Image: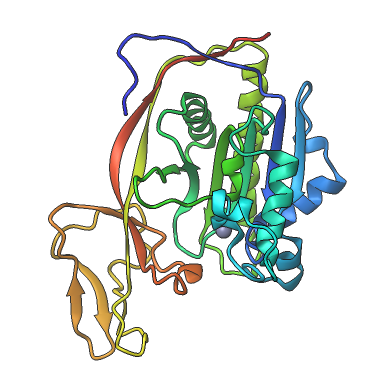
Amino acid sequence: MLGSAMSVSSGVSSIRRVAIFGGTHGNELTGVFLVKHWLKHAGEIARSGMEVRPFITNPNAVEKCVRYVDTDLNRVFDNQGLGLQNKVKIPYEITRAQEINSIFGPKGSKDAYDVILDLHNTTSKMGATLILEDSNDDFTIQMFHYIQKSMAPVHCSVLLIEHPKVKYATTRSIAKHPVGIEVGPQPQGVIRADILEKMRRIIIYALDFMQQFNEGSEFPPCSIEVFKVLEKTAYPRNENGELTAIIHENLQDQDWRALNPGDPMFITMDGKVIPYEGEHTVYPTFVNEAAYYEKNEAFVKTQKMTLSAQSVQCKSL
Ligand SMILES: [Zn+2]
């Protein structure tokens, strides 16, 4: 979890190939607008010595302005999805995942892209959020530290989705350094200028960090606060699968804030409060996310912790 007390530089090769993914979910419009813009006007994201490639990952879902056509593209980048073949009807997103893996991967190989920035929106009040997949990825932790400093006073939370049982198999996971960027609240199918501006700045700072890294800057050891995924909390439902309670107003919009044992969590239509009955304080996020009703997730519980990274410096100048 924590780096050693000694400062040992992690040698990481220079960053040569970066992809910016928009439209992994077709109704999350900030990434769709930014990527479509950059496909025509690449100047803002161009960096010398680096290929920076904007890419619409799920064009059919973007055209229909839906999250996906057949299945969630952001959950199929595992051996099962990427290896599926010769079936009568392969879901569109599985075929698409295999195409994406052949262009930007193969996942886990030395030919995979160095960094993928995957752009998402949430209907939850999470603000600007960076998603980390690996607590040992010092390079990405250093990048997040740089972005947080650059974004201040706008706060940038970090969600760590490393979990022994919950596997996400995200689209960006084919890269050596996967970066999820999740900005909200923004309704599905809606584009807001304030949200767009935050996401745009995060991407520019991420590219600035990579450029400085390639030019030989040494980034000293650092620590960041992260919220690590513990478990998902389901909605209360009846035998017909219908919701019997909704998110309590005290929890609504309270992403990243402490939820203590006994605090209100849900409320039924006749006003009965269902409290949180866990033993420990947790930090909910993705509270009342619209896309997660179908996944039966009311919110995700996290724990707050500190992650340290060793210094990083490019080893191939
Ligand atoms: Zn998304």
Location of ligand 1 given as a quarter of the image: bottom right
Q: Do we see residue 78 in this rendering? A: no
According to the image, what is the colour scheme of the structure?
A: rainbow
Q: Residue at x 29, y 42 (%)?
A: 304
Total residue callouts: 0
Give me the residue at 47% from left, 74% from top: 294
Give the position of the C terminus as an image quadrant: top right
In the shown orientation, is residue 62 left or right of residue 141? right
Could you say where residue 98 lies in the image, as x and y percent from the top left?
69, 51
Q: Nearer the viewer, residue 13 or 300?
A: 13
Which image quarter holds the N terminus? Answer: top left
| Residue 14: percent from left, percent from top | 66, 18
Answer left or right for 43 relative to 114: right
Q: In the image, is residue 110 above or below residue 68?
A: above
Which residue is located at x 65 percent, y 45 percent?
Answer: 200
Q: Is residue 99 visible?
A: yes
Depth check, front residue: 22 or 72 = 72
Which residue extends farthest front? 86
Quarter holding residue 224: top left
Residue 307 figure quarter: top left
Q: Position of residue 55 (x, y in %)?
A: 75, 48
Residue 276: give x, y in percent of width and height: 19, 66
Left or right of 229, for residue 119: right
Q: Is residue 154 above or below residue 147?
A: below
Q: Nearer the viewer, residue 310 or 84?
A: 84
Q: Answer above or below: position of 225 versus 316.
A: below
Relative to 98, say whether 208 is above or below.
above
Q: Residue furthest right?
A: 40
